[in-house]
Image (cartoon, rainbow, N blue to C red):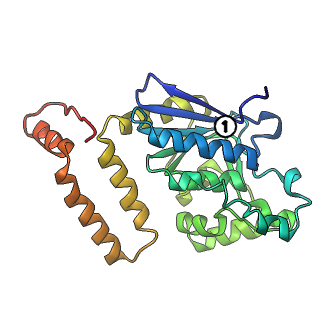
Amino acid sequence: MSDPLVVVEKLEAPAKVALIRFNRPKVMNALNDALCKELEGVLRELDDDANVHVIVVTGNEKAFAAGADIAAMAEFTYGDVYNQNYITKYWEAAKNTRKPIIAAVSGYALGGGCEFAMMCDFIIAADNAKFGQPEITIGTIPGMGGTQRLPRAVGKAKAMEWCLTGKFITAQEAETAGLVSRVVPADKLMEEVLATAGKIASFSLPAVMKVKETINAAFDTTLQQGLQVERREFHATFALEDQKEGMRAFVEKRKPNFKNR
């Protein structure tokens, strides 16, 4: 049997964290339909797993994902991509996952790799990471959210320059622009990411998912609509046992024991 295109590990330490690794090292983890179909199934399974609260996605030291598999789609016709619903069919599973997903990026995250990282809830980058949307250099444009998520992350001017020139963006520039949450030394990337994932996983899962849902609403609604979503979800936490436990623990000056309900 061939090797899996994504490797999944449910970690014991930190607890309640699942680690997904892209596994196409010979092509710098280039994304294709087969990998994304496999990933979709994995994410669905982890989203349904009560013992997993946080998901980390990474590649290897050289590449998170160096883009979509150009060789696989070089001879596609318009009819091919339209009829197959190319990209939409499998590639957007991350945006439909309710639990937090952290992208741990080392090396290249270009084209579809950069777009997938942006689909995650936030990115922690190694200091050797390189981001970019170089589709213009091969006669096409981003098709997995690069022209939509990138302006929301870094603003119109930078997104326009990056997509029109196809330039590679250093980890430091990506952090300054707001594309990544922080940059860490390459040899400390997984240590830092897993520590962050473990901290999130220690909190009440319903509250964590509500944070994700309400922040995402900020990008799809007006300010007033977003505030209403936030207020309703805030009110809803008062139906949770974990809200009672968390606030009582604070008053009693002890560590809360969340039950995730």
Indicate left or right for 52 with 208 as reference. Answer: right
Q: Is residue 256 above or below residue 261?
A: above
Residue reaching furthest top?
12
Indicate left or right for 31 with 21 as reference. Answer: right
**Quarter of image, res 50:** top left
Residue reaching furthest right?
75
Indicate left or right for 189 with 48 as reference. Answer: right
Question: What residue is shown with label 1?
Answer: 59
- Residue 6 percent location from the top left of the image: 67, 36
Q: Nearer the viewer, residue 164 or 226?
A: 226
Indicate left or right for 156 with 249 as reference. Answer: right
| Dot 1 amino acid type | Gly
**Quarter of image, res 216:** bottom left
- Residue 213 percent location from the top left of the image: 39, 58
Instruction: Look at the image and tell me in which quarter the C terminus lies.
Output: top left
Residue reaching furthest left?
252
One can see residue 169 in this view: no
Q: In this view, does 184 lie above or below 149?
A: above
Q: Which residue is at 34% across, 47% downward?
A: 208
- Residue 255 percent location from the top left of the image: 19, 31
- Residue 250 percent location from the top left of the image: 13, 39
- Helix, strand, or loop for circle 1? loop
Count the numbered circles shown: 1
Instruction: Look at the image and tell me in which quarter the N terminus lies.
Output: top right
Q: Which residue is at 45% across, 71% downward?
A: 220
One can see residue 15 in this view: yes
**Quarter of image, res 245:** top left
Q: Residues within 10 Å of mark 1 (few under 14, many from 20)?
A: many
